[in-house]
Amino acid sequence: MRALRILFIFAILPAFMFLCSCGGGSSRSSSSISPSQTITTSGTNVASISVNGGPLGNYDDAAFASVTVCVPGTSTCQTVDNVLVDTGSSGLRILSSALTVALPQQNASNGNPVFECFPFISGYTWGPVQTADVEIAGEKASSAAVEVIGTNTPVPSGCLDFGLPSSGTLDALGANGILGVGLFAQDCGADCPTTIYYECPSSNCQGISESLAQQVANPVSLFATDNNGVIIELQAVSGGEQPSVSGSLVFGIATQSNNALGGATVYTANPTSGNFTTTYNGTAYPESFIDSGSNGFYFLSSSVSGVPACGGDASGFYCPSSTANISATNQGTNGTSRTVNFSIANADTLFGSNDSALADLGGPSSMSAPYFFDWGLPFFFGRNVFVAIQGQNAPGGTPPYWAY
Amino acid sequence: MCKRQSRSISSWLPVAGTGLMIFVIAFPAWASLGGDSASIQADQLQMRGTRQTIPAESYTVHEIQAATGVVVREYISRDGKVFGLAWHGPWPPDMRQLLGSYFEQYVQAAKAQSVSRMGRRPLMIDHPAFVVHLSGHPRAFAGMAYVPGILPPGVRAEEIQ
């Protein structure tokens, strides 16, 4: 049955779409669909993921996975579903409200418990750093540092001074956690400032310099095998929007028969920032990036892109009167470059449906310079995207890199 | 070092005039949005780093490079007001320090945007009294802020970057 459905999607559907596009008019072509896409669905290194609205049903263009956390070295485990798959960050974060197993606390050398304030533009995560065996598909990261978010411990001023909202509840996060499977092995890095990690005695948390070994880790980098990166494989969206889309999170790059780089082009990223260059209309934007955790194509401003912005409820998104076709070129620091074609539909209209997989959702990334492209989740539809972790060996280039 | 910095600064500035000069001053400084240039001295203990002063046609840019890798540029008008700020770095800066009297309003506006629609996307606050953008991802954040009401005549918000 599943094989039939996949056959439909990859063999029959493209033919159907071709017929549609002959009719002209309101073509809903989404980000250029590779006719050769193959989605791996079996293997000990394959976890299923879904773009389905998440646990509250209100999260457009976000991919969710299930992750099992265990008290290290024991069979005391819990599977947490609806964890957001985020290639824009590294490390596993789980809402305390979704966690029923008691994980051991990481302590500083003086015995004080270690906490973390991790900033995202959509909000900060705050909570204790704990240790878990993290299991996904047949893979296991033993004794990985994870962040448990949304506990009652008072948030220190260094964290509040980011001025960001808290992502410490299900209502705020829209997910039971964040699975950061990005370009780096640790979440903060070697030059981590003292506004990220804290040691918290009974009162008055103090900022600390957390060592790389103690930082919240990209669990993939701790796997015994298949630890050099991931592939996000999501089906194409038919007709521009669907209630949901399924796919796979595949671990390892060229470590098994099911995760070869194949014909994918490697785009190496800046090893400090994790960014690369996107060129639009002759102008290069060197602070661009690919991020499954951004829930749209976010790029330029309305005045630079020429795509009208929405007002009212859809503020922050683009609202063209008819679907806008955009072409931009991604270039890695290794010099490889290829053009990406994608479409932006009217977000007001898109939000009017109950669909959670929106191929043509986007918005401005800022209202003034410096501009950039944030290739969010819609970029992943119909396109297998490789994410290779810094410090690991992977074919085709030196990580950190993306390939697609 | 100086040569590299001057090239990077000039690439950021839409230079209308000629003879752009850069003074490198090795002491820390920081001012708040809407504050006057005296607040630079008052706040200079906040951030360890180096400061550059870049005179432009109708304003001065103070660039502060902090030890944490965050770079902040403060745009100060001829009458000594900080009318705009831009920053980039691996982590967000101390926004309370940067936004000063606008901080609490910013926090409320950021919260309002976050609850308006589920999703992870750039933060864009276009309040009548002030504008703040924040974008990026862990290890690469960027943002800017300005007060429309005190932009010097002829200066476009685009110049704050």
Image: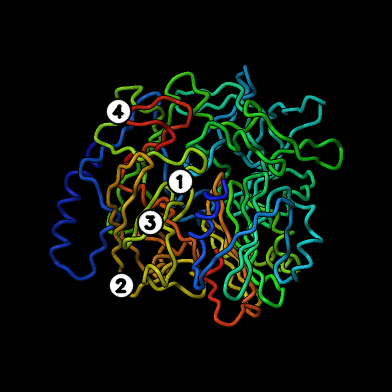
Q: Are marks 2 and 1 on the same chain?
A: yes
Residue that numbered label 2 is attached to: A322
Q: Name the kind of residue labelled 1 in the image.
A: Asn
Q: Secondary structure at mark 4?
A: loop
Q: Earlier in the sequence, mark 3 or mark 1?
A: 1
| Circle 2/circle 1 CB separation < 8 Å | no
Q: Name the kind of residue labelled 2 in the image.
A: Ser
| Circle 2/circle 3 CB separation < 8 Å | no
Residue that numbered label 4 is attached to: A260
Please determine whether, in this image, residue A224 is positioned above or below residue A162.
above
Horizontally, residue A30 falls left or right of residue A82, namely left
Mark 4: give few (<14), some (14-19) or many (20+) Cα within 10 Å. some
Which one is nearer the viewer's eye here, A212 or A287? A287
Q: Nearer the viewer, mark 4 or mark 2?
A: 4
Mark sitting on residue A275: 1
| Circle 4/circle 1 CB separation < 8 Å | no
Residue B133 lies, in percent from the top left, at 57, 63
Q: Earlier in the sequence, mark 3 or mark 4?
A: 4
Residue that numbered label 3 is attached to: A284
